[in-house]
Amino acid sequence: MESWNTQSLWGLPRTAHNNLLPLISCQPPLSDVIAKRFISYVQRCLTSDCDIVNYVVQYGIWFGRMSLPVGCSVQHCCNKYGFTVYDFACVSTKNIDKYFLQNVGHGTVDIARMLLELIFIRDGSLYFNLPYVLFLISYLFTM
């Protein structure tokens, strides 16, 4: 849903690749935002003064890993962002911010920069031949 809203906001074709949208909008992917919030939440639960909260989260991570939502989600974050369950309590959410940019190729970043310039031209911030700009935007997003 987020990609469609971003696409319509920027006036992009429906066939636009989702991996370019975070680069153009200068916002992390929605899945990374949710993961950061989840990691912070679980870390707060692990250090909670409430013994029940602390116990339930620890049990979910260490023993009920794939049968409880908290354990399954922690394992997913560990697999996706490259850290272990043992490191989970001390993982910095800044690592999540770096993850997306580290896994985007230089070619993709170059395409995103070119597309952003073309969008500025299309919207009148810069001047260029509009039909040619519309063709380039559509071509670059769908290649």
Image (cartoon, rainbow, N blue to C red):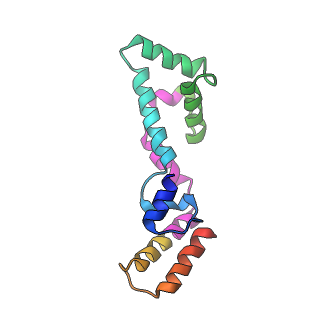
**Residue 37: x %, y % from top left:** 43, 37
**Magenta-drawn segment:** 87-112
Q: Nearer the viewer, residue 72 or 6?
A: 6
Tell me, yes or no, whether the highlighted magenta stretch contains residue 110.
Answer: yes
Which image quadrant is residue 27 in? Answer: bottom left
Q: Nearer the viewer, residue 111 or 3?
A: 3
Q: Quadrant of the C terminus?
A: bottom right
**Residue 91: x %, y % from top left:** 46, 34
Name which residue lies at 54% across and 16% down.
Answer: 59
**Residue 56: x %, y % from top left:** 49, 16
Name which residue lies at 61% across and 37% down.
Answer: 79
Predominant secondary structure, magenta span: helix
Residue at the outermost top position: 51
**Residue 128: x %, y % from top left:** 43, 86
Name which residue lies at 39% across and 77% down.
Answer: 123
Residue 131 visible, this orientation: yes
The image shows residue 87, relative to residue 125, as above or below, that is above
Tell me, yes or no, whether the highlighted magenta stretch contains residue 76.
Answer: no
Residue 22 visible, this orientation: no
From the viewer's perspective, is 33 left or right of 65?
A: left
